[in-house]
Amino acid sequence: MFKLSVFTVATPDLEPAELCAAARDAGIQGVEWRCKETPAELLSEPPSFWGNNRCTIAPGASDREAALIRDTAASHGLQNIALVPYLACGDIEGTEARFRLASSLGATMVRIGVPGYRADSRYSELLESAYAYMDQVDELARDYGIKALVETHHETIAASASAAWRLVSRYSPDRFGVLYDPGNMIHEGMEQWRLGMEVLGPYLAHVHVKNASWYPVVDLADGQPHPNAATASGAGGPEPDPLTPVNWKCVWRPIASGTVPWKRVLAALKSVGYNGWLGVEDFSLAYGSQEMLANFVRQIRAWEEELE
């Protein structure tokens, strides 16, 4: 069976102790802690994934605070598997601080920074900047015994499995791995699922579980219906206005209702011998946090049985 975890960015309304209790009750075994500063002005706002997220560890957490998180997870039978910060590529001082915090938590993986990609960027230059940073991260990974993770993420130079492999493949898989995120790859970077896993080989270190889909924007900027709306929505036939392209938008969906065919992805993971963690990161807002965690466990365990 796959091991199941939760990335706490997806449970912004729960305090750490509440999250640990909910994860235990749902049947989850591991926790990936969001690590980010929360500006004071956000603390009065409602909980949100990337704003006032109450299930977040501050980068400057004290030893006592880290010990409390570690002990709270342990008391609920949970393993702290990863620290997931939002590091900038090149921030080696911040990266070492996060490795140190991860070690205090007992976590064995840390997500590192990857250059973003924009139209005014040069890939070759960004790649070299990533390597210069990762050469130093390699030393930290060896010294701390923690694996550095490169996440497949849209709008970065690691949007696909193949692109992420190009970053990590010059280093040891004992110290670097790829956080494989099919939901992100619907936004950008989608490859045939098993192909990507085979490319990654021993660098396939962790998997995030969420979903997304594209849909056509059926109104024009002035609010009028797009002439090609019916065609884009699947009605078929010729386009009423072939010179006016339809815009498309990618949005988060519940795990069973998006473009990622999770049953097929699980089958592919099993076929390549992956037996690591699956971490839920559902941004769909379809369920409350506790129900989302319970649904995730029910889904994965039911789909695993179908593979046997």
Image: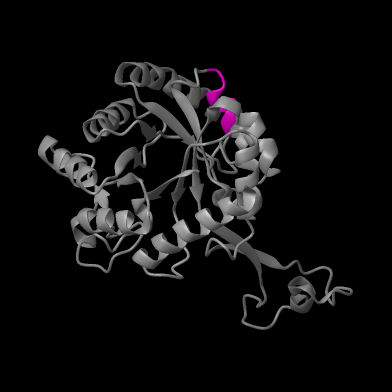
Residue 123 in the image, given as x and y percentages of width and height: 60, 32
Task: Confirm whether the magenta stretch covers residue 295.
Answer: no
Residue 294 in the image, given as x and y percentages of width and height: 41, 62
Residue 27 in the image, given as x and y percentages of width and height: 37, 54
Side of 162 relative to 54 (left or right): right
Q: In which quarter of the image is residue 163?
A: top right
Q: What colour scheme has been applied to the protein in the rendered image?
A: one colour
> What range is drawn magenta here?
164-170
Res 122 seen here:
no
Q: Which residue is drawn at 78% across and 73% down?
A: 234
Which secondary structure dominates the residues rendered in magenta?
Answer: helix
Side of 79 relative to 216 (left or right): left
Between 41 and 7, the residue placed more toward the observer is: 7
Q: Which residue is drawn at 32% across and 30% down?
A: 95
Outermost left residue: 64
- In this picture, is 38 found above or below 272? below
Between 242 and 113, the residue placed more toward the observer is: 113
Q: Quadrant of residue 217?
A: bottom right
Res 295 seen here:
yes
Residue 246 in the image, given as x and y percentages of width and height: 72, 68
Q: Which residue is drawn at 33% across and 21% down?
A: 145
- In this picture, is 269 found above or below 187? above
